[in-house]
Amino acid sequence: MAHDGKKLYILVRCSEPFMDKIRVDQDRYSKGMQRDDRVDFNLSTQRGHEAFHNWFVFNTDGANWRANSLTHRLNPGFGAVPMGNLKGEDFWYAEIAYDFNQLLVKGEPIEFGREYYFNVGRCAYGVKQTLSGLCSLWNPDEFQICVFTNGTFSPEACRSAEDAFNKPYNDYLTGETARIAAMDWEREYGKYKTLDKENRAKASALSEKAGNAGTFEAKSDVLKEFQVFDAGLRIARNEVAIAVANASAIRKFTLNGEPVAVPSSGKLTLTITEGPNVLAAETAPGAKMNFTVRDCPQAAGRWRGAGKAPESWTSREFDDTEWEMVQAEADGSFTSPGCVRQILYWDLDHKGPYRLLYMADRWNFISGMIDMLQAYPDSPTGFTLKDYTITMDLPASMSMPAIDPAVAANGPFTGSRSFGEFAPADSLTEADSPRSGYKRWILHFPDGTATKPRKRTALLFIGNDGSMKPWTDFDAYYCRTAGNFVEITQTLPCRILPPVNGRFCKNFYWEFSTYGTFFPHKYVPEEAAYDHTMIPMKAGFNLFRKIHSAKARKEMAGLPIWKTMGTGFSRAAGKDKSEFSKFVWDTPKAHARFFKMDFEWGGDAPAGFPAYMNKRETTKFCPSYILGEGCEAFTKAVDADLKQAKERNPEIKLAYCNWEEFPNFGAMDWCFCDLCKAEFRKFADVPASIQLTDETIRDKYNMQWVAFRTMIDGKTTILVNEILRNRGIDYWLYSQTRQQEFWKAARGGIALPYLGCPAGPALGSNQQVMDSTYACMVENNSAKYMMGQIFLEGWSLSSRGVNASPNRPKLAKSQFVRLAASFHGGASLWGAPTLDGIGYYIGEATRLIAAHESLFRDGVRKDDLVESDGIAYPDALVLQKGAE
């Protein structure tokens, strides 16, 4: 990095042996930052989560992106900042120039000699996902010090600074070369069956080379060579025995396009690799053929054929779906038209790159309950598969609920944030299994389901009758078929867990989000929907905003479940929906004016915005009117709605609002009416001689407007909280952790703040973030009890990635305990407690928390009391309350 007093220049060289596999956002960040191969750079005036910084991103294609963490304002797009790129055979190189006035969130000038805090690192999503940087890539608590100087330095001083800057990378190189030098290759790669004589020799030579590598260049060369070698060794191999009847009729036989000699005996042993493998045979037309794959009876007769074929027909890439399936007899024999193909799919285990199920070491089932297995009805071939089925062999004590044809006819569900496109099966068949003590279940999916990898999700609902003892381990078996696509049967390790045995807490709020954006309830059988509610309830969850099972609603009546209501106190969608909506619709002064508004208030959103915004997000109200002239009428309308809600349900205790409003200058940003501008003029002390157009505010008073809008958002929140409190209802408001200016403006006005923290799993790696966030909220919002937010592993779309880590349900217990010790108020769970037995482990946590609730609620953290050589913060947390 260097500067000339006007611009900061960043030059980056990234080593990459797989340049052809680099992922690049095709939209050039025009739709926001995406998961691609890129470099991230951050700069701030402070450390910690109370600090704000600009987040800069640039990739191998010259696209760059910038986000302001204070205003959440984006500056996307190709060419937004001057940038140069160069791509080599095993590296990519980028240089970019940022104006000094772009570097800090408020546009303040860079001061020479002052300490700033920064990070720079790389995100790679090619062959192997990698996040690397000077510190944890997105943890501002660990940002490093950067000082801008305007002097000159000796070559020695420059080298010293460069050595310090590159020390983390040099340490990484040293550690990796030492590991390669001492590598036990058989232990590391034996299971892949790739250590043949040639690869063993390469491995030995590479270990020797690593042991002798002393310079930076030598270590870099070792790692480049190792990356390529490692990727090849991890492409698992398997030997498959095939018996060919009428072998003399074969003119040519290939495996993945490579010729294979067929002996007269017809007995072949083929070495296939993980993924799809294409068997192709050219035979005498009309010949009677039969190919028997040992231990794979589902492959019998599953071939596509044609009389003539193009030159590429034996390759993996050739799309044969227009070829007709051969007419096979019961034993799998068929009459060949001349050219026939079969796609034989194999994974080393159930965690392979194109696995059926989401990543888990084993699948856990709670005794007597229905679990949801997330399945991916993908096509690993590069083209859409037809007649797609999943066949599962399960113990006889397990079953799958019947599929309602009316539900299946609805087609794919596309609105789920966690599942992407939900793909329901259109039929379920129960059959006898050749395995003793097992039943077979065959799910069939509509044509068009199995498209490109990781686009759709199917939920496999599997129940058990509770007859298997807890902690029983067993195997389930599955395979996928689709026309001539056949999977070799895969084994799924499973375990029965004990019944869920959680406890309700009196003063902790544990919310399970059950709305349709996270759970496609209208596609779920009633018995599965019932268990989907009862498992979290038994685990100790006491907040449910929607309960989709009528049976569960009846059984939960009278239990200590907190009753909630939604508010939506930022818009007035639906004119006759409530007294509040009527008031806003009938009062023109209450209508917000949007930035450079060119659409009708209450009508459709401008072109290019999502359809859900139509007649909803266009009904924002003017906060200045609500806080001033219209305050009494607003209060009366909201109170009338609360009165009606309490009459319908006297047990309502919480009113929820998802705030997340970020003052900005886009077509759907508000409120730029004359009243708001008049209030802003007073707030920012703008001279009367200056005409406050929308553009003037954006161009000349940008940050002052953000501060003004944040201030009145806080006042609006405090007003709503007061109205709710008068009705005995607590205000439960969600907004993002980094909106600290808003939390400060709403100080004392939120009974239950709900933060997007840690957002990911509540693991030790996030403990520092949780603690600094809590301290920041205590200072800015005066809150003592608050709710965190947890995303279970395996919940989101990213869990289906080739390099995703296995879900670890056991960790759910420690995560909930961490949340209780960190925020003292509870958390909202994003994910499904009916997934992989997680509900059992959450129940273990709530039972512990409920038994010591006062300690978790009001205890003071004293982590330094731990006396141990082997464990310390963040892996050990201590709460102290009096003698406890």
Image: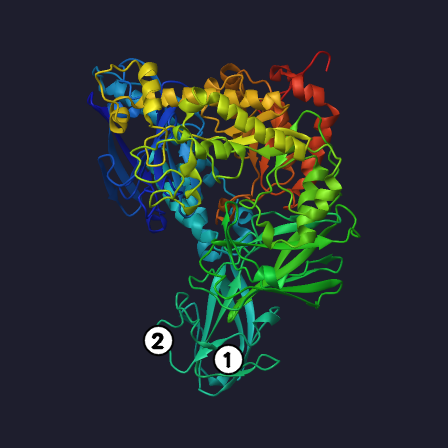
Numbered-mark total: 2
Give the residue at x 75% y 60%. 396
711 with respect to 836 (left or right): left
Residue furthest front as drawn: 586
What amino acid type is highlighted by mark number 1?
Answer: Val
* Picture coordinates of residue 357, whole percent (x, y): 57, 53
The label on residue 67 is none
Q: Decide if residue 768 is in sight here.
A: no
551 with respect to 90 (left or right): right
Q: Quadrant of the N terminus?
A: top left
Q: Quadrant of the C terminus?
A: top right
C-alpha separation, residue under disc 2 versus residue under disc 1? 18 Å
Q: Earlier in the sequence, mark 2 or mark 1?
A: 2
Q: How many neighbours does mark 2 have within 10 angstroms: few (below 14), some (14-19), or many (20 or more)?
A: few
Q: In the rendered image, which residue does mark 1 sit on?
A: 326
What amino acid type is highlighted by mark number 2?
Answer: Pro
Is 48 in front, or is 505? 505
Q: How many neighbours does mark 1 have within 10 angstroms: few (below 14), some (14-19), or many (20 or more)?
A: many
* Picture coordinates of residue 356, whole percent (x, y): 55, 56
Is 282 in front, or is 764? 764
**Residue 409 against residue 863 in the figure, above or below:** below
The label on residue 310 is 2
Disc 1 element = loop
**Residue 522 against residue 742 in the figure, above or below:** below
* Picture coordinates of residue 522, whole percent (x, y): 59, 52
Residue furthest top as drawn: 882
